[in-house]
Image (cartoon, rainbow, N blue to C red):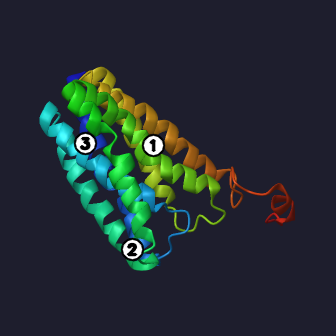
Amino acid sequence: MNILLNLLVVVATVLGSWMAFPQARRLARTRRVEGVSAVWIGVSLAINGWWLTYGIAAGVWALVPVSVVSLMLYTSMAVVYVGTVGRPALPSMAVGFFVLGMIPLPFLVVGGWQLAAVAVGLSYGVQLLPAVVSACRTRDLVGVSASTWLIAWIEAALWLVYGLLGVADIALTLAGIVGVVMASIILARLAITGHEPFVGVDPRRRLAVTRPM
């Protein structure tokens, strides 16, 4: 059992470190940002900072390397995104980082890491929510990497199993549940609906769209 759990955490760590890479590479190569949320990039920077801090504080050392690599990748995405869109992208990223990304802070101040762990775990959903909303409302998804979200689904499932059976860690368990749900929504959006958004489209415009053969 211990060997299996150790293997799970190794695979989850590798996948977690790799998750943002396809999206970062896609942005760098194409300079196309359609369907990619600036708020998501900003909040992802903040939440990975929280995971790094939590991993060190709680002694969950498997979280440290994946958090460091993820911070580097999201930083590169932020640079490319701002370089492509310009200064108008900064307010959205700031909202992601300083508003959504700071949700765990009051929990840490009030209840220490025991309470903050719950907030950090649930904040993974806050991290992914802007990406989910953007993907569900956007007509053109050329900027979205399916590989990133497939990796995110597998990674979240592995952290869920490890959080439940390995270290009985509430933050990892909650993050795993939320991650599986959020990644599933985006994968369904990419695979099932094609170019038609789930929400935010005028029905008259929807009827006017010619479906591809």
The answer to whether any part of residue 201 appears in the image is yes
Which of pointers 3 and 2 lies earlier in the amino acid sequence? 3
Which of pointers 2 and 1 lies earlier in the amino acid sequence? 2
On the image, which quarter does residue 104 sit in? top left
Residue to which mark 2 is pinned: 82
- Residue at (47%, 37%) from the top-left corner? 180
On the image, which quarter does residue 81 sit in? bottom left
67 over 139 or under it: above or below:
above
137 over 80 or under it: above or below:
above
164 and 201: which one is in front? 201
Residue to which mark 1 is pinned: 153
> What amino acid is labelled 3 in the image?
Trp
- Residue at (39%, 34%) from the top-left corner? 122
What percent of the width, then of the height, locates residue 123? Answer: 37, 39
Residue to which mark 3 is pinned: 51
At numbered mark 1, what does the secondary structure look like: helix, strand or loop?
helix
What percent of the width, then of the height, locates residue 77? Answer: 36, 66
